[in-house]
Image (tube, rainbow, N blue to C red):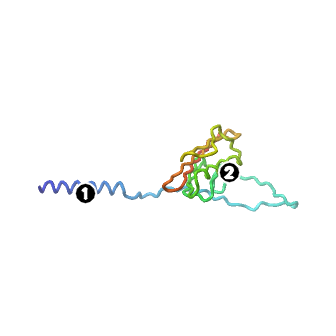
Amino acid sequence: MRKNRTLLWMISLVLLAVMVTACGGNDQPTEVVQPEVVATEEVPVVSDGEPVPTVTEGPELGTYGQPIDVPIMDGNRDLQISRTGGNINYKIDTLTLQEVYDYHVEQLDIIGWLPGPHEVETVTSRLITLARANEAKDRITVTMQYNPIGEFTVITIVVNRAP
């Protein structure tokens, strides 16, 4: 009986050690990618009131540090942008999937992404993807998935640039 109790205590201690190890915190902080902040400069103006063109280095970036031709909704949360700008993820609260879809269709049209052959006007499921291309043969997919429990939409954007 005493051997069984000792064995039971040893097994319990081993399981406890395994749980503490598995659930314990990571000593190294995880890297959070923050969007780059672009400093704005005052553009010099010539005497007739027109700005002097200036040469800028690097690609133009949007409001959140994303490539200028990729739309991101205001009011987003948990925004993640890869270093290359080719993968973007974020969430939107309190909007229906149809509203999120309509925003992306409108913005992609304005920016110059050409509509794909299978786009729909009315969203009938909780998951929808827009697939488009531009004149430079770049491709973009915008996947929107609605979570009815949390009442938010997860947006995933993938951009593949033509060589």
- Quadrant, the N terminus: bottom left
Rendered image quadrant of residue 50? bottom right
Q: Pick the residue in front: 48 or 143.
A: 143
Circle 1 is placed at which residue position?
A: 13
Tell me residue 155's x, y (percent). 57, 50
Circle 2 is placed at which residue position?
A: 68
Residue 32 vertical placement versus 126 (above, below): below
Mark 1, residues whose alpha carbon is within 10 Å: few (<14), some, or many (≥20)? few
Q: Pick the residue in front: 97 or 90.
A: 97
The structure residue drawn at horizontal position 58% and vertical position 57%, both measured from the top left corner, is: 76
Tell me residue 136's x, y (percent). 70, 40
Tell me residue 79's x, y (percent). 56, 55
Q: Pick the residue in front: 73 or 51.
A: 73
Residue furthest toward the right?
48
The structure residue drawn at horizontal position 67% and vertical position 47%, both measured from the top left corner, is: 108
Q: Secondary structure at mark 1?
A: helix
Q: Secondary structure at mark 2?
A: loop
The amino acid type of the residue labelled 1 equals Leu
The structure residue drawn at horizontal position 63% and vertical position 41%, both measured from the top left corner, is: 119
First of labels 2, 1 by sequence position: 1
Q: CA distance from mark 2 to mark 1?
A: 56 Å
Judge from the rendering whether residue 154 lies leftward or rightward of residue 110; answer left or right: left
Tell me residue 101's x, y (percent). 62, 49
